[in-house]
Image (spheres, rainbow, N blue to C red):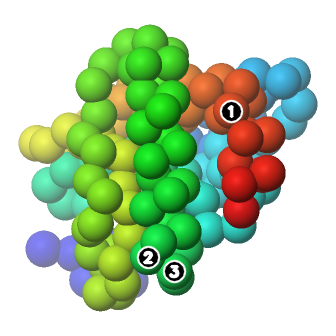
Amino acid sequence: MYSKEESARLRQQFWISFGQYMKPVPSASGSTVNWTNYKTGVKNIFFKMDVDGKKAFISIQLSHPDTGIRHLIFEQFEEFKLMFTNTLNEDWDWIKDSTDDFGKTVSLISTSISGVSIFNQQHWPELISFFKPRIMALDEFWDNVKPVFEDLV
């Protein structure tokens, strides 16, 4: 078991390594992007990546405080589900009402892998291989649909 400080250091080291690995990769539009802290440019829509001692996940998190509007945004994503699945080349979990780490109700579109740990540096190549193609595909998908969500919110 790692101390809180060692745990934080390993997390930071992983995300710095991932960021450096991804830095030369341009976005779908050809611009520079901060892959580890991806900005969608639309309020209350986030692309999240995280990993702990047991699993890694990547998601689109919809966190609009108004349930009706959040559901409307989620339903708009559902309209693009075929395009999403074709761009990502895999099926993700679609959850209209979920709870985030802070107890707040959000909508999630996500996928994860288990049996990996951020605390085991031997797992880092597997984690990078999990995150890289998915965040790039999310960026490609987002490049195509972002205007719809800018107009929606």
Q: Tell me if residue 88 can be seen.
A: no
Q: Position of residue 63 (x, y in %)?
A: 50, 71
Q: Is residue 130 left or right of residue 23?
A: left
| Amino acid type, mark 3 | Asp
**Residue where numbered disc 2 is placed:** 67
Q: Is residue 16 left or right of residue 34?
A: left
Question: What SS does tag 1 mark?
Answer: helix
Q: Position of residue 91 (x, y in %)?
A: 27, 25
Q: Residue at x 19, y 60 (%)?
A: 53
Q: Position of residue 148 (x, y in %)?
A: 73, 41
Asked if 104 appears above or below 93 in the picture, the reply is below
Q: Which mark is residue 66?
A: 3
Circle 2 crowding by C-alpha within 10 Å: few under 14, some 14–19, many from 20: some
Residue nearest the observer in this picture, 86 or 127: 86
Residue 50: quadrant of the picture: bottom left
Q: Quadrant of the N terminus?
A: bottom left
Circle 1 crowding by C-alpha within 10 Å: few under 14, some 14–19, many from 20: some
| Amino acid type, mark 1 | Val
Marks 2 and 1 sit apart, C-alpha to C-alpha, by 22 Å
**Residue where numbered disc 1 is placed:** 145
The mark lying in front, picked from 3 and 1, is 3
Q: Are marks 2 and 3 in contact (CB under 8 Å)?
A: yes
Residue 96: quadrant of the picture: bottom left
| Amino acid type, mark 2 | Thr
Marks 2 and 3 sit apart, C-alpha to C-alpha, by 4 Å
Q: Residue at x 51, y 80 (%)?
A: 66
Q: Tell me if residue 43 can be seen.
A: yes
